[in-house]
Image: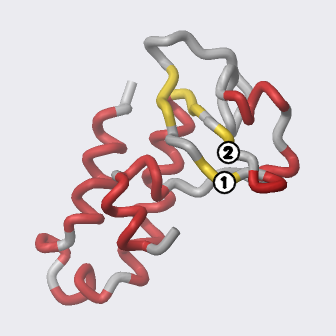
Amino acid sequence: MTATEAADAGPLAMLSLPNVSSLSGRQIGGTICVWCGASMTAHTARDLGARPGPGGVTIFPRGCSDCVRAAALRTYGVHADSCEQCVDNPILCDTRRALRRLALEVHG
């Protein structure tokens, strides 16, 4: 997925997942957090969208609020360091705003 495609899919699609081959079946299936393995409820789980998995199989990971927030902040930092628009004028960067909004939205 290109950066433009990820931005069009929303900030959750921009979050990097752990190496899919190291995930358990429950993490791949979205019943526990893809990052920390914590149990989640329908209220606390964040759907990270369909992602390509091993062997061309689509996976449906989900993350807990704390991990989604941490991943959004990491992605925000990486993005801000490598985005020409952020260097020129960060206020105009839609991706930066979307990642910041996501981090604030999931803040518990």
Q: Is residue 86 above or below residue 36?
A: below
Name the residue rendered at 46%, 52% in the picture. Answer: 13
Question: Considering depth in this image, is 15 or 81 the residue closer to the camera?
Answer: 15
Name the residue rendered at 50%, 41% in the picture. Answer: 49
Is label 1 in a helix, a strand or a loop?
A: strand
Quadrant housing the C terminus:
top left
Residue 101 left/right relative to 71: left
Name the residue rendered at 43%, 67% in the picture. Answer: 77
Q: Which kind of residue does numbered mark 1 sit on?
A: Pro
Q: Is residue 51 above or below residue 47?
A: below
Question: Considering depth in this image, is 29 or 96 the residue closer to the camera?
Answer: 29
State the image quarter where residue 26 is shown.
top right
Q: Which kind of residue does numbered mark 2 sit on?
A: Thr
What numbered label is drawn on residue 58? 2
**Dot 2 crowding, Cα within 10 Å, few <14, some 14–19, many 20+:** some
Circle 1 residue: 52
Q: Is residue 92 above or below residue 103?
A: below
Residue 92 left/right relative to 14: left
Q: Position of residue 64 (x, y in %)?
A: 55, 28
Q: Mark 1 touching mark 2, by CB under 8 A?
A: yes
Q: Position of residue 98 (x, y in %)?
A: 27, 54
Is label 2 in a helix, a strand or a loop?
A: strand
Residue 17 left/right relative to 85: right
Question: Considering depth in this image, is 73 or 3 the residue closer to the camera?
Answer: 3
User: If you read the primary sequence from the N terminus, does the residue marked by circle 1 or circle 2 appear first?
Assistant: 1
Q: Position of residue 68 (x, y in %)?
A: 50, 39
What numbered label is drawn on residue 88? none
